[in-house]
Each structure stands twice: as C-alpha cells, then as structure tokens.
Image (spheres, rainbow, N blue to C red):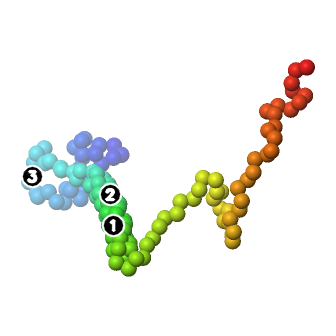
Amino acid sequence: MKLPDEQFRAGHLPTELYRQIPPGTDMGRVVIVQEAPRSYKGPILLTLSITAGTVIVLLVAAFVAQIIAASIIAVLSASCGLGYTFSRANRSSRPGRAIKGRSRAPRRRPSRSRPARPKNAYRK
C-alpha cells in the first residue's frame, strides 16, 4: 500500500483526515471524496481556438489590405492618370541575372545542322 488510493480502498485514513472527522462518527459510514485529476482538454482547446482566431484575423487583414491597395491604385489611375503595372519575367530570361543598359540580341542558330550522333557511331 504505497499509493494513497490503495490506502483509501483498504479503509485506512490518513491522520489529517482523522482530525477533521468529528468525534463519535461511525467510520464505516465515512465516504472520502477525492478530487478528480486535472483535465487538459480545456487549455488545449483554448490554445487551438486562439491560434485559429489569430490566423483568421491575419488572413482577413491581408485580404482587406489587398482590396484597399487595389482600390487606391484604381482611383489614382482614373483621377490623376497615374498607373501601376506588373511586369512578368520572360521564360527565356534567367532569374538572378539582370541585364544592364541595352538589351542583348537573340542567339542565332548554327548555319548548318549537326548530326545527332558523331560520325564514328554510324555503320559502314
């Protein structure tokens, strides 16, 4: 009987409980109520709901900011002639290499076609 639960089941009462029981009480009718173990369901659900709420608030704020920016650009372009354009990179350009100054001429193809295999790979 090492655990308090085993002592309670065997009918042994700790001394601090004996002092709280009034004298003349029948010990066979004494019921000891233990506190239930702590449940972590509440704090976990609270943390998850706070996290989900924060994510939803940030998504709504980003969406509203995007709408406000688009409407400001639309009003400025309609009223003052100010415009904003998005430039998309060409497929042929390599990311990370900026072309400075003038644009390069397109690459020329070789004047004669090359065979797919070297000459010594053909049968004789």
Quarter-wise, where is residue 122 in the image?
top right
- Mark 3: give few (<14), some (14-19) or many (20+) Cα within 10 Å: few
Residue mark closest to the camera, 3 vs 1: 1
The tag earlier along the polypeptide, 3 or 1, is: 3
Nearest to the observer: residue 61 or residue 75: 75
Res. 113 image quadrant = top right
Residue type highlighted by circle 3: Thr
Q: Secondary structure at mark 3?
A: loop
Residue type (three-letter) at the residue carrying disc 1: Ile
| Residue of label 3 | 25
Q: Position of residue 67 (x, y in %)?
A: 33, 66
Residue position marked by numbered label 1 in the rendering: 67
Image point 14% across, 48% down: which residue? 31
- What percent of the width, then of the height, locates residue 54? 33, 63
Q: Residues within 10 Å of mark 2 (few under 14, many from 20)?
A: few
Q: Classify residue 122 as left or right of residue 75.
A: right
Residue 30 seen by the camera: yes
In this rendering, position of residue 53 left or right of residue 110: left
- Structural distance between the alpha carbons of marks 2 and 3: 54 Å
The amino acid type found where label 2 is placed reads Ala
Quarter in which the C terminus is drawn: top right
Residue 103 place in picture, x, y as percent:
68, 65
The reply to whether residue 38 is in sight is: no
Q: Residue at x 32, y 63 (%)?
A: 60
Residue 72 vs residue 78, the one in the foreground: 78
Q: Is residue 82 above or below residue 113?
A: below
